[in-house]
Image: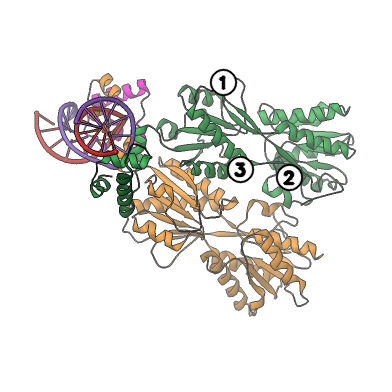
Chain colours: A green, B orange, C purple, D red
Amino acid sequence: MEDVARRAGVSKMTVSRVIRGIPSVSAETRERVLRAIEELEYYPNSTARALANDVTTNVALLVGHPPRFDDFFNYVAKGAELELARRGYSLILVMQQSEEGDLPMVVRQRKVDGLLLGGPEIRQSLIESLLANALPCVLLANRVSHPPVPSVCADDFGGSLAAVQHLISLGHERIAFVGTRRTFYHVRERFRGYVTASESAGLRVRPEWCIEVAYSQEEGRRASLELLGQSDRPSAVFYSGDLLALGGMEAARELGMSVPGDVAMVGFDDIRSAALLDPPLTTVRVDKEEMGRVAVELLFETISRPDAEPRQVTIPTELIIRKSCGAAVASQ
Amino acid sequence: MEDVARRAGVSKMTVSRVIRGIPSVSAETRERVLRAIEELEYYPNSTARALANDVTTNVALLVGHPPRFDDFFNYVAKGAELELARRGYSLILVMQQSEEGDLPMVVRQRKVDGLLLGGPEIRQSLIESLLANALPCVLLANRVSHPPVPSVCADDFGGSLAAVQHLISLGHERIAFVGTRRTFYHVRERFRGYVTASESAGLRVRPEWCIEVAYSQEEGRRASLELLGQSDRPSAVFYSGDLLALGGMEAARELGMSVPGDVAMVGFDDIRSAALLDPPLTTVRVDKEEMGRVAVELLFETISRPDAEPRQVTIPTELIIRKSCGAAVASQ
DNA sequence: TTGAAAGCGCTAACAA
DNA sequence: TTGTTAGCGCTTTCAA
């Protein structure tokens, strides 16, 4: 900066003003400074700026432990990075190191101006510590009631409502629900959609057909084996996540049942593999990149107006009808 | 820091020494300082440290344009982040904004101490600019001959050799190769493995069966339709990447051919979907997390000894035999 | 073994 | 419109 100032025959301060676009600089001076900047290929040092301004221009995306950086958050990260880059910010990727709600290193070190908290595995206690430290946060694919935090979720309720209504419209009256822990907001919502769709069609929700498992293909398989192994079995299964549905298809294969012939299956999320399965999985598409993008938007709102009412944004979902549900028309 | 110093009854300088573990501090003073740090929950400000030391403790993972942050780099990022965190560093994720070899923002701003350059889409000119700016770099899944840069690649040659030899051992004598641009190091190596395996088995490599396409499922499909639509067609196809093989399976389906009955298929990379296909895809597994981890190791070597001979590390691959190759024994 | 002063590259506040 | 001074939170250098 010193060099630029010398070359343009002005003080460092004037250079600083030109860089920041402060109007109180005469046109000709600005011109001279810009030329000097160009000639010297000068670019301001972000560390020094950060120290002087107390703004790092970094945002962290924190994903839960054990390192759950999968297809879903891959897209979210992409959407977030693109939006951050547009604003001159950078994305720091952080895998939580333990299940505890310890403050992440990047926070202790003050390396970031805010955080995107990915998924429901983020502990409530961590959210509270972060807020107590006045760190702007946005929840991604999660929502909490008590401390008011902005959040971005897919339309979990609406998506699941549409999925189950679709099954019902295909004639199914015996629909089971296999999902992860209902302490998770998104699972609760997806379950609510299932219940609402069922009940408003006059179908009874049978508790023994509502199964709670961990999020893995193997767990989806186990639950499905149990469900489908009985004589009194459902004719369709709605899974709260595609990975569980993968396990379900595995189970059906093991039992010699055809999908959708003997049992229809529908998932949620539209992970990359969903379309590649045999049969291709009918599922609810979540726009993950858009979620990342919007989360960044909310974060900036929070940074600029920390006391504003936190917004809770819901991203629309779309039912993607493939073959696993047995609908006549199958796209993709 | 001032506060800690006051509380411990020493100067800032002594606090700094204790934090950095500098020995010339008496045991009792150190004790007092540590207590004060604990009581005040003091944690050094990384921005200030960065400015004083000219070390940001940040590393960027740069992925090519158009934003190719897929399954492969998802795992690489995970491996890299874990290793960086162990060393007190952070990972900044950067999607290249254009095809040009412009210096990324994080570099101009001096936000990072080094870069991991992901994939062959990174322009040679960019690599050279980076090196000219004395920025430590490591190539990931890429290798160049001219400027000496450390790199981490899978055993592209060995993996493809094993894959094609396996096809040959199954009796195939008419094996085609579908791959992306041979200007890419990894494709060149994989092609070399194909040629070597073929020729040492006395098989003729037919140029019209060596097809070059872009990396997408659709391109894999198109190439395969062409290959398999002729009467004089191969009995097996080796794809330089799983995504292409997905397209291949699609093509076979369209042509009413069974895999592996009418044509055997083998991929490379072992992306997440590979095992889920019907039939499950035989492929060469690449340890992507390990690649990320090792890349970080190399980067630190380069940072600490910039003039040392750059290491070129090759990560072993493993042939994963599933069903698409037609082998009798199928695992997974 | 400890501390005081200067400086890393920038910006806020004030003065000219 | 422009420049000077002080300071962001740390570390380096030198002196005590």
Give the spatial CA distance, label 3 vs label 2: 23 Å
Q: Residue D6, relative to residue A263: is it above or below?
A: above
**Residue B111 image position (x, y, % from top left):** 39, 44
Q: Are marks 1 and 2 on the same chain?
A: yes
Q: Of the two numbered discs 1 and 2 on the same chain, state the one appearing first in sequence.
A: 1
Q: Is residue B26 magenta?
A: yes
Give the spatial CA distance, label 1 vs label 2: 36 Å
- Please report contact status of discs 1 and 3: CB closer than 8 Å, yes or no: no
Magenta residues (range)? B17-46
Q: Is residue A264 magenta?
A: no
Label drawn at residue B271: none
Which quadrant does the N terminus of chain B fall into? top left
Foreground: A277 or B156? A277
**Residue A58 image position (x, y, % from top left):** 45, 38
Q: Residue at x 32, y 56 (%)?
A: B306
Q: In this rendering, which labeled residue sits more in front, label 3 or label 2?
A: 3
Q: Of the two numbered discs 3 and 2 on the same chain, state the one appearing first in sequence.
A: 2
Q: To which chain does the residue with label 1 belong?
A: A
Q: In this rendering, which labeled residue sits more in front, label 1 or label 2?
A: 1
Residue under label 1, please give it: A147
| Badge 3 element | helix
**Residue A53 image position (x, y, % from top left):** 36, 33
| Badge 2 element | helix
How many C-alpha atoms fall within 10 Å of the one at disc 3: few (<14), some, or many (≥20)? Answer: many
- Please report contact status of discs 3 and 2: CB closer than 8 Å, yes or no: no
Residue under label 3, please give it: A289
Q: Residue B230, relative to residue A299: is it above or below?
A: below
How many C-alpha atoms fall within 10 Å of the one at disc 2: few (<14), some, or many (≥20)? Answer: many
Specify the amino acid type for callout 2. Leu
Give the spatial CA distance, label 1 vs label 3: 26 Å
Question: Is any atom of residue B31 visible in this view?
Answer: no
Foreground: B66 or B115? B66
